[in-house]
Each structure stands twice: as structure tokens, then as C-alpha cells.
Amino acid sequence: MLAPPRLVIDYEILSKYCTECTAAVRDLLGDSPDFAIWYEGHKSECQINLTGSSSSMEMEAAAILWQRSIKECNMCYTCILSDGDSKTFQHLMSLNIYGKGKPIKKEVCINHISKRLGTGLRSKVKECRSKGVCIDGKKVGSLKETTIVKLTNFYRKAIKDNCNDVEKMKSAIYATLYHCSSTDAKPKHSKCPNGKFSWCFFKRALANEESPESHSVMKTKLTEEVVAKILPVYQRLASNEILSRCTSGKSQNANESLHSVIWSHCPKESFQSKKRLEISVVTAVSEFNFGSLFTLKHVHQNTSLPSMQISWNHQKSRPLTVGEVVKVENSLKNRTLWSLARVIQFISGKDGHVRVARVKTETGELVRPVQGLNNLELQEPEIDLPKDLTDSVIRTRRRRKVISPKRLTNA
């Protein structure tokens, strides 16, 4: 269960398998008195906590989380963000957990709903092909795979940019379709946004009081025949019923990110017991909420300083500061031979962004791009490391001692 700002506040692990029960059934026979006696002592430690079908696992887990939300988390979950499957939502509604005064609202992931458009367009291509009509191919204006990907991205962006208003979402979705089918003889830009900063080149030129360019400059084109074939797909996915569930403009990216951390500790490719999965989930939740550095510091007390610092550098990209010693990147030399320098000034461009820095080396002052200056993997003063991990000698990631040149020490 994720809550703003993308923190895991609760979770539940369900299992239909117990290794000890499987071995006992094999050795003692499941219907024997010996197994019954053994199971009485094992019942409290059995890993099986779900007896229903595997398809009902998500519904049961959601019901457990919702039912204990007030008691353990002191809050009500009034919204559920999911994919197109409504079984879990219908199950929660049937339980009426919070009563009639606090209904649960269903939101749809915008990534999932945009994938449904791509699936619908590909199905339409196959359907037309089975009837002897080819709407895909290499011709200009056909529904190629690259065009389907672009239309899917346009559809998602239209929802994301106008998530607060269903009518604006619908208008923006149709604008992307008709814009791609416009020609010089028959422009269709009535639904495209107005203004000098419009994504539509036609409306942008009109706002600047210029003559619009030819429609041949468009990269994504559709013919009238293709639009007529795919219009029912757009009408279905641009209905008020579907768009009203996308008003939050949210996706399941945070949830998938948590899953990736879990499966990095507990790979899907091999069987894992419930105990192993519990350890992986607890570790993943800790890393997801607080970062991997805290896991290394509190769980792996014997971790060396270099690995702690590598974790810190991956967790937080530390910006350079004036006076910091850096390594100047040189593509002609090995990384270990890069020269040391001290940052003495940052130079801003006309747009205010810093892309260049002035550094001092043993041979003099140089001006180098900031991207070519590499931080030394040094201990951050704000990191509270265990006492046994302190190191008075400054070292690089490969444990080499860093000795600053004498000319840099007083810069």
C-alpha cells in the first residue's frame, strides 16, 4: 500500500504453499493420525495463509489491508489505483468496509489505459487484414507500428496534461487524431490548442501571424481511410466512463518500482519460500522508503567504507562545490591517470545554467565542462557511519590513497 509522497505504509504477504507441510504429507501421509498430531503443533507456524484460488489472492490481500487500515494505520483508503481489472474493486465495494458514508473510488493507471489504445489499434490492423483490407504497410499515412507507438504516447500525454477536466481530455485526444490526418487541402486543427506555444504548428503559426507551413512537414500522418477504421477504438477509449477514472493522472510506476526492488532480493525465476519473501519485502520496503544506505548501515554492520560510499553516490548525486578536489576527465588516459584539480569558480551561461567550471591543477588553471569533472568518492560529513567504519585516510573507490598536491592545499 503506497501513500503520498510515495511511501510504503502497509503490505501483506499471502502464500498457498508450506515446505514443511509438503514434506509431512509425503512422509506421514496426509490422512494419517500421525499427520494430524504433527499438524496441531505446526499450525501456528504454517506458512499457508490462503486457501482460495490464486486468482483471488489480490482480492484477499486488498481486503486485509483495507480492514486493518483504521486500526493499524489510523486512516481510510478512499481510492484504489489499479489496472483495468475491477475484481478487487468490486470485492472491496461488496465488503462495505467504511460504511455508506465513505465510498471507495477507483482510479485507472494512465500507463495501462494508454496500452489499451495500442492493443486496440493492433487488433484493428489484424481485423482489417483478415478481411483483405490493408491499413498498415510502408505507404505514407498507413498505420505502421511506429505510428501506433506515437499515437499511444499522444493519447497518454493528452490525459496527463488535462487530467482535471474530462472534456478537455476528450478534446485533446481527438485533436491528436485529427491533426495527424490533416492535409493542405483539408486542415483539421479545430481541436488543436491555440497560442504561440501550441504543439500544433498550424495554430502556432496563426498565433504568430505567420503563414503555416505545408502539412508535408508532419512526421506522423494518417489517411482518411485509416482514421475511419480506427475511430471506433478512439470513441471507446475516450468515453466519459473511462476518462472519469483517469482524473488523478497517476500511474503505477511507484508500485512497479517497489516490485523491482523486491525481486532484486528475491528473483522470480526460482522458487522462494514465504519466509525468504518476507525478508525480501521488509528489506525492499526499508530501501524504498529510506534508501539503501540505511540498510547497509543498520543491517550489514561489517560493510567496508568503499561499499558504503558507493551506495551513497548511487543514492544521491552530489553536486560539486567551490573548493572541492575533483578528477578531470581525459578520454586519452586511463581513469586512474586522470589529473586532480580544485574547483575555484562556476561559470553560468546566458540561460543561468552552470555547465562550465574553472579548476586549478598543478600546471595552472583550466576551464572544463562540469560533466567532465568527477567527484571523489569521499565520506560525506552528514553520514553517521558506525565507529568501526571510520577511515582517516582519503581513498578512492578502488581504495587508493588520495594525496592532494601542495599547490592545491592552499587554493
Image: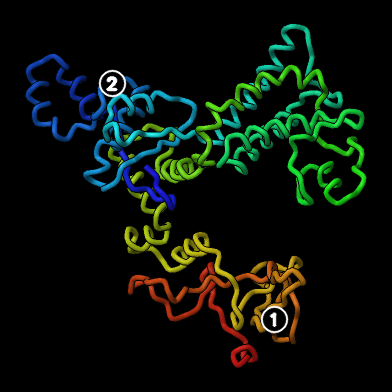
Q: Who's the residue at 72% across and 77% down the image?
A: 347
Badge 2: residue crowd in 10 Å (few <14, some 14–19, many ≥20): few
Q: Position of residue 40 (x, y in %)?
A: 9, 27
Asked whether, in this view, residue 158 is left or right of residue 66, the answer is right
| Residue 232 found in image quarter | top right
Asked whether, in this view, residue 379 is left or right of residue 64, the answer is right
Residues 94 and 394: in front is 94
Which numbered disc flags the more N-terminal residue, 1 or 2? 2
Q: Amino acid at mark 2?
A: Gly
Q: Nearer the viewer, mark 1 or mark 2?
A: 2
Q: Position of residue 191 (x, y in %)?
A: 74, 35
Q: Position of residue 239 (x, y in %)?
A: 58, 25
Considering the numbered disc 2 on the image, is that residue within a helix, a strand or a loop? loop
Considering the numbered disc 1 on the image, is that residue within a helix, a strand or a loop? strand
- What is the spatial separation of the Cα atoms under label 1 and label 2, in whole angstroms? 66 Å
Residues 391 and 323: in front is 323
Residue 23, above or below 2? above
Residues 308 and 246: in front is 246
Q: Position of residue 271 (x, y in %)?
A: 37, 32
- Quick check: marks 1 and 2 in contact, CB under 8 Å? no
Residue 168, above or below 337? above
In the image, which disc is placed on residue 52? 2
| Residue 188 found in image quarter | top right
Q: Amino acid at mark 1?
A: Val
Residue 357, above or below 89? below
Badge 1: residue crowd in 10 Å (few <14, some 14–19, many ≥20): many
- Mark 1 sits on what residue? 359
Query: Which corner quadrant holds the N terminus?
Result: top left
